[in-house]
Amino acid sequence: MNDEPDPTPDRKPNSLLEEIRRQMPVANQPMIVSSEHLASTEAWRLSEYEYGLIVAFNAFSRWMTRCMAAAGFTDFSPLDVLVLHNCNHRKRSKRLADICFVLNIEDQHTVNYSLKKLMKAELVESERRGKERFYSTTEKGARTCQEYRDLRERCLVDTIRSLDADGEDLGRMATLLRGLSGIYDQAARAVSST
């Protein structure tokens, strides 16, 4: 008989999903939800997922604003950061409607406000073509996006890579999140018509 403790709890996980599964509650433990009153018998898992989404969203928002601050811009909201990166994406000019569509934002005025802030900081510029206005990053904006990327590589990507060497788990989670966003969009349309 071996009296040594099992080394499994201390070993490094092989993948990001394995690490997440390791931290998930076992069947007899209570689930973590933010609003117990929403969790019917059939909806506990959904409430647990929603709480995880809330926590992840807030952590991601905090990450974006702090990374942008480290890149030299302290007064930007998470939406401002997302809009800047979308304007820089593929080095193509985009209309307000294009940016809103890609980011899945209904309220164009919030994106418009972000664009005004980014133009005031000289990170984004606009150009009128016919009746449309197109937005793209300036050289300063492109440099800022590159600085953000460098900080992201140093502070975030290396850690994620150590948990998920091939990126397969992140890819599966991204697919799942996109699918669930479609379900929430459909439910939002349904509840709006009731």
Image: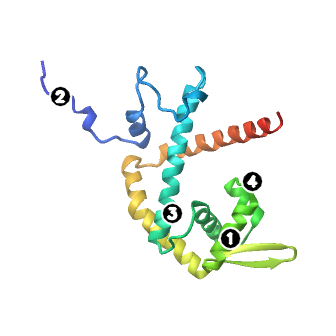
> Considering depth in this image, is 119 or 94 the residue closer to the camera?
119
Residue wearing tag 3: 65
Q: Position of residue 137 (x, y in %)?
A: 63, 75
Q: Within 10 angstroms of label 1, few (less than 14), some, or many (20 or more) residues? A: many
Q: What label does residue 106 carry, if any?
A: 4
Give the left or right position of residue 114, taking residue 34 as reference. Answer: right
The amino acid beneath tag 4 is Glu
Q: Residue at x 59, y 42 (%)?
A: 177
Q: Quadrant of the N terminus?
A: top left
Task: Kindly tell me whether residue 32 is visible in this rendering.
Answer: yes
Q: Using the numbered discs, state the Cα–Cα distance from disc 2 to disc 1 in whole angstroms.
A: 57 Å
**What element does badge 4 sit on?**
loop
Dot 4 or dot 3: first in sequence order is 3
Q: Using the numbered discs, state the Cα–Cα distance from disc 2 to disc 3 in whole angstroms.
A: 43 Å
Q: What label does residue 115 carry, if any?
A: 1
Residue wearing tag 2: 5
Q: Position of residue 51 (x, y in %)?
A: 53, 38
Dot 2 or dot 1: first in sequence order is 2
Q: Pointers 2 and 3 in contact (CB under 8 A)?
A: no
